[in-house]
Image (tube, rainbow, N blue to C red):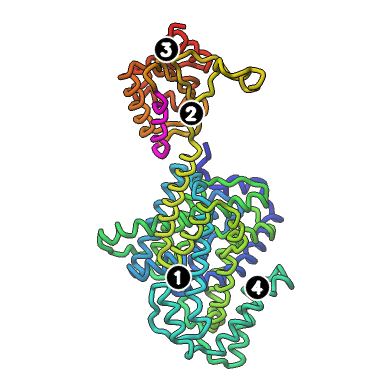
């Protein structure tokens, strides 16, 4: 069983000054990458900029001390923008704080009960779909600042937002648009010129310099507090707390998915193995603290963690340096940060949204089954048009229903082909492979899982029943599992056959179906002598019953 021990303990074995310098440099580089993103994500979530920076500072240090990955870098990500905006719009900042704390508690419980592996059961179409939907939502939210619009209160609905934009197009600020477009060009082109210095940093420096020295009349970030308020637990009604369970669970799932994905990706780079359960506990602890301080949720960032690994980071010390460097930026560089134009930050988030919307992944589903395409489209559209929580719920239900439909289609019951006197052996090559079956006997081959979605197919066992039939042999070597509903259907079939004095014989019953039959008392009803280990034994029992 996986150890619940922070990776820091084992990572520090054999630690030396050379690795310390590599960790320090990597931490500083990732902090430079994270600063503009933390500010942009905070504004996107609907809170002030310092909440994003402190979210990155606090989470990176806590996860470094408690986490299960060597090079994980945590902080706010674009995935939280939609859910936090929704929570703030409905319950205010107090609601966001409570939801974040609740998500943290859920994550700790997931880690303690080692539920990290369950995340892999979320189907890929749902993950790709709601990630694409989040990208569309982020883009929609940033259009206002990108166009330089002064709209006091934006509607919550996706379609209403776009309606408002079209109604106010005449008020768009051409200066803000041109500056934003220049920053988008920088963000796209710069990585092809230089892969060391982050493109978001260059975009902010260039965009802010042009706006400041050119004395451009564009909206800026403004004064940012250097400190957080005191720790507090908001007072919400019991009804509000219960209604926040769903969004809190969504935050917890998003945190777990991104953190574990990031850990898996970086494991491949540094040839390590993360501890998923400990990582979830660390992410949970950090989000509880973030909630107490009113900061936005945080999780492991794939891009930042990869940058850490590729720049020499190999221990959690790099993440600690990342947090310390961000704190330095917050305290020392604040006079410069406050003059950053909002259209520049909007340009950064627009490019982030484009990168989040995995066009290649969407196009790859052109050749996928229609059911997967349906889940993909539903998850994506519901995310941006309605709600992320609804998208995940509907996506999971739809995926489960379609999966059950597939399993039901796979489950088949076929009657055997029998040797008859009319068939000429020379003209029927299959005859040599057929087994001799006693008269007055039917043999059925069942394949696939027997569950409630396929339980009705068991009725086929009585379809060919005639008055002269004395035995029905059911071969179950292809049945890996059976559930209660199918078990009840099997009982009904047995009861019907028993009334007509027809004996049921089972062949090659696998472990799970046999245990289910035993617990249900079905083995006793059928008789141990009628549960045979193989088809030859079952046919021998049939010959015995038919008196041949």
Q: CA distance from mark 2 to mark 3?
A: 20 Å
Q: What span is in magenta?
A: 452-465
Disc 3, SS:
helix
Where, by quadrant of the figure, is residue 453 drawn? top left
Q: Which residue is mark 3?
A: 529
Label 3 and label 1: CA atoms lie apart by: 67 Å
Total marks drawn? 4
SS of the residue under disc 1: helix
Give the secondary structure at mark 2: strand
Q: Residue furthest right?
A: 193
Please report contact status of discs 3 and 4: CB closer than 8 Å, yes or no: no
Q: CA distance from mark 3 to mark 4?
A: 75 Å
- Which residue is more in the foreground, 520 or 23? 520
Comes first in the chain, label 2 or label 3: 2
Q: Quadrant of residue 440?
A: top left
531, 277: nearer the viewer: 531
* Residue topped by disc 2: 446
Q: Which percent across, then down, holds residue 534?
A: 52, 17
Residue that label 1 marks? 45
Above-or-below relation of 17 to 184: above
Mark 2 and 4 residues: CB-CB less than 8 Å, in contact? no
């Amino acid at each position: 069983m996986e150890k619940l021990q922070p990776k820091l303990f084992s990572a520090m074995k054999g630690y030396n000054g050379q690795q310390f310098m590599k960790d320090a440099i990597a931490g500083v580089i990732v902090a430079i990458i994270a600063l503009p993103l933390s500010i942009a994500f905070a504004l996107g979530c609907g809170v002030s900029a310092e909440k994003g920076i402190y979210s990155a500072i606090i989470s990176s240090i806590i996860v470094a001390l408690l986490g299960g990955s060597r090079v994980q870098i945590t902080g706010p990500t674009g995935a939280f923008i939609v859910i936090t905006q929704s929570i703030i719009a409905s319950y205010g900042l107090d609601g966001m704080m409570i939801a974040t704390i609740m998500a943290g508690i859920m994550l700790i419980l997931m880690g303690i009960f080692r539920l990290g592996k369950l995340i892999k059961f979320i189907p890929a179409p749902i993950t790709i779909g709601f990630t694409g939907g989040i990208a569309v939502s982020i883009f929609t939210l940033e259009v206002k600042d990108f166009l330089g619009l002064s709209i006091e209160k934006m509607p919550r609905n996706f379609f209403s937002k776009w309606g408002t934009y079209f109604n106010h197009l005449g008020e768009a600020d051409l200066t803000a648009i041109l500056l934003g477009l220049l920053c988008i060009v920088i963000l796209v082109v710069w990585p092809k010129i230089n892969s060391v210095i982050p493109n978001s940093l260059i975009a902010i420096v260039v965009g802010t310099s042009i706006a400041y020295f050119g004395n451009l009349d564009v909206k800026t970030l403004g004064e940012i507090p250097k400190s957080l308020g005191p720790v507090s637990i908001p007072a919400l009604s019991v009804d509000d707390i219960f209604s926040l369970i769903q969004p809190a669970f969504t935050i917890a799932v998003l945190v777990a998915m991104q953190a574990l994905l990031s850990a898996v990706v970086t494991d491949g780079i540094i040839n390590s193995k993360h501890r998923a359960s400990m990582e979830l506990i660390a992410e949970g602890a950090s989000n509880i603290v973030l909630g107490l301080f009113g900061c936005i949720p945080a999780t492991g960032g794939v891009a930042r963690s990869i940058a850490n690994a590729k720049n020499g980071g190999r221990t959690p010390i790099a993440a600690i340096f990342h947090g310390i460097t961000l704190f330095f930026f917050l305290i020392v560089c604040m006079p410069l940060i406050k003059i950053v134009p909002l259209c520049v930050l909007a340009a950064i988030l627009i490019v982030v949204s484009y990168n989040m919307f995995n066009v290649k992944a969407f196009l790859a589903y052109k050749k996928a089954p229609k059911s997967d395409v349906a889940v993909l489209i539903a998850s994506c559209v519901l995310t941006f048009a309605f709600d992320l929580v609804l998208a995940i719920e509907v996506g999971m239900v739809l995926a489960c229903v379609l999966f059950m439909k597939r399993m039901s289609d796979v489950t088949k019951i076929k009657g055997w082909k029998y040797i008859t006197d009319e068939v000429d052996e020379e003209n029927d090559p299959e005859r040599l492979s057929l087994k001799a079956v006693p008269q007055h006997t039917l043999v059925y081959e069942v394949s696939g899982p027997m569950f409630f979605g396929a339980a009705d197919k068991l009725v086929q066992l009585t379809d060919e029943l005639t008055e002269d039939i004395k035995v029905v042999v059911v071969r179950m070597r292809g049945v890996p599992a059976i559930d209660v509903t199918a078990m009840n259907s099997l009982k009904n079939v047995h009861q019907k056959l028993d009334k007509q004095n027809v004996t049921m014989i089972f062949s090659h019953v696998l472990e799970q179906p046999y245990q289910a039959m035993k617990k249900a008392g079905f083995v006793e009803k059928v008789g141990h002598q009628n549960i045979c280990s193989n088809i030859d034994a079952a046919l021998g029992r049939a010959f015995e019953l038919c008196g041949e």
